[in-house]
Image (tube, helix red, strand yellow):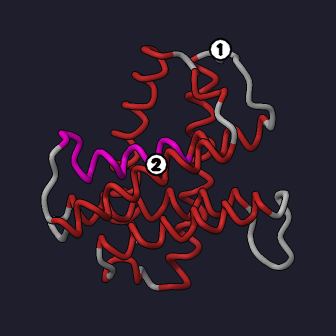
Amino acid sequence: MSNTNYQYDEAVKTCKDIFIKKTKDYGTAWRVLRTISVVDQIFIKALRIRTIQDLKKQKVGDDIVSEFKGIINYAVIGLIQLELNDPKVEELSVDWVSEEYDKYIAFAKATMMDKNHDYGEAWREMSQESFADLILMKLMRIKQILVNDGQTIISEGIDANYVDILNYSVFALILVDEGKH
């Protein structure tokens, strides 16, 4: 698993670089997004991945790898928004955003390492199509949780679904980097 540890960090490093550069370009305009809007942004990206997979061609420049990176960054935005719990027009400092990004990536990675231990890195045998489908399923779960006013009876909450979405995307990037997808 030490290779997974390194690969995870490498995959996320490029995502954070993009996230911080976009924060410098656009500020924290994403602060206005409500949970459903974050979910819809991830949905658009995941559905685009699935469409490209199914059609085996694309007409717009951003490739599947770029979309998985975008999903990771929107999942972090979703986690930050849940923590702040008040979507509004607000400019946050790049330094604060960078620290929050690292905090949520560290949490997602720790969750992944625990699950990896128990599941024996089963994700390494999964298809890229499965990652896209699982992300879409997690998004549908979040939408249902929102319909239920954020309440669950027995299931994990919105935050756990964002973490899984983030980790599925990292797995996809790792496998692409290994030449498996």
From the image, which quarter does the C terminus lie in?
bottom left
Q: Earlier in the sequence, mark 2 or mark 1?
A: 2
- Mark 2 residue type: Ile
Q: Main secondary structure of the magenta part?
A: helix
For the point 48% across and 61% down, which residue is it? 167
Residue 115 location, x and y as percent?
56, 76
Q: Name the residue under label 1.
A: 91
For the point 74% across and 44% down, which residue is it? 82
Residue 99 location, x and y as percent?
61, 31
Q: Mark 2 points at which residue?
A: 72
- Mark 1 residue type: Glu
Number of other residues with Cα within 10 Å of mark 2, as a class: few under 14, some 14 to 19, many 20 or more: many
Q: Is residue 163 magenta?
A: no
What separation in Å lies between label 2 and label 1 (alpha carbons)?
21 Å
Residue 156 location, x and y as percent?
74, 70
Which type of secondary structure does the marked residue at label 2 adopt?
Answer: helix
For the point 33% across and 55% down, which residue is it? 48
For the point 28% across and 62% down, which residue is it? 51
- Residue 101: which quarter of the image? top right
Q: Give the range drawn in magenta.
A: 60-75
Q: Please state if 65 lies on the left or on the right of 92 as rendered.
A: left
Q: Please state if 81 lies on the left or on the right of 120 as rendered.
A: right
From the image, which quarter does the N terminus lie in?
bottom left
- Residue 5: which quarter of the image? bottom left
Compared to residue 93, the image places residue 62 above or below, namely: below
Number of other residues with Cα within 10 Å of mark 1, as a class: few under 14, some 14 to 19, many 20 or more: few
